[in-house]
Image (cartoon, rainbow, N blue to C red):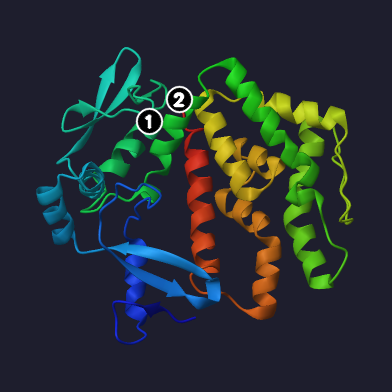
Amino acid sequence: MFWVCKSFSRVSPGVLKYRSLPVPDFRNSKCKLKINSIVCPRLFSTCYSLNKLSETKASIETDGGAREKKLLEAKNLRNRFWKAASLRTSEEGYEICLDGRILRTPNGVPLRIPPNRTTFAHLVAGEWESQEKVLKIHALPLTSLAARAIDGLNTEESRIKVVSLLSKYLDTDSVCYQQDFPQKLVKLQSEHFDPILSWVEKKFGLKPNVTSSIIGSKQPVKVTKALQKAALQLDPLELAGFERATIAAKSFIIGLALMHREISVETAAQASHVEVQFQISQWGEVEDTHDVDHQSIRRNFGAAVATTLRD
């Protein structure tokens, strides 16, 4: 892939650095930012980059552009703006504070951790304390789960709805779709999937349908209802972790086994990537894709399990 840039006299991979900058909405005719147009012929698309920050500041000073000012403010918010993160106890639990001011969820609700989750509360505070010069959102997985529990899973109705949506994974669950060839893949499936399916059968007295057909195999109603009931027994914080784990694994069953501490984070990650590991063994690892996914899924699973930690 190569890039042709109107503001450069030669093709330069260096223009890729512009991809990390914020992109204005050019459908707004009031946007007056000067831009460099970067064209990628292979993708048949045009993307835009902002001029230097100093030029943006100058535009704000001369034109008083509200949009440019918001972009600059957004950039400043990405920097660490607090000196210390701390915990404060209250009647409702633990409050996460930045320089003494309580952290709030996206809905503006104070971020409070239940009083029986002391370890989890310390871990959330640690996420903010460990941030360095630039705020990294991906390094706040526990904070996002706590906010999800408070904003989105605070009513029985919302929890039932989420579990109902997640249960749709059962009809396409990773552990229930097993190929019968090649033999190396069959062996990997048996090694990682069979213990989890055996746990379901032992725990709930039910045996999920397993198939190798691409047509699909809908799970029996009694299996779906039993597993939904188990998920609804999780409290809001745990349910937030279960939701994260299920989506990451593309498996309701792996997510449930993880939250019940039946399998470890590593075991869950390996089970979720059986086909990926088989492909890597055949064709090799894709840099900046497979290695990133390897760490990302373990971070998500680790955060999910942390929601189960109680005093």
Question: What residue is drawn where x is 86% and y is 69%?
Answer: 181
Question: What residue is drawn where x is 57% and y is 54%?
Answer: 266
Q: Quadrant of residue 46?
A: bottom left
| Residue highlighted by disc 2 | 151
| Residue highlighted by disc 1 | 106
- In the picture provided, is 42 more to the left or to the right than 256? left
Most foreground residue, 306 or 14: 14
Whether residue 191 is situated above or below residue 119 in the rendered picture: below
Residue 65 at x, y = what percent?
Answer: 20, 45
Question: What residue is drawn where x is 52% and y is 40%?
Answer: 305
In the picture, which quadrant includes the C terminus? Answer: top left
The kind of residue tagged 1 is Pro
Whether residue 26 is situated above or below residue 186 in the rendered picture: above
The kind of residue tagged 2 is Asp
Residue 196 at x, y = what percent?
Answer: 74, 46
Question: What residue is drawn where x is 29% and y is 37%?
Answer: 125
Residue 273 at x, y = what percent?
Answer: 65, 60
* Residue 306 appears in the picture as rendered: yes
Q: Are marks 1 and 2 in contact (CB under 8 Å)?
A: yes
- In the picture provided, is 192 more to the left or to the right than 73? right
Label whose residue precedes the other's in the sequence (1 or 2): 1
Q: CA distance from mark 1 to mark 2?
A: 8 Å
- In the picture provided, is 98 more to the left or to the right than 107? left
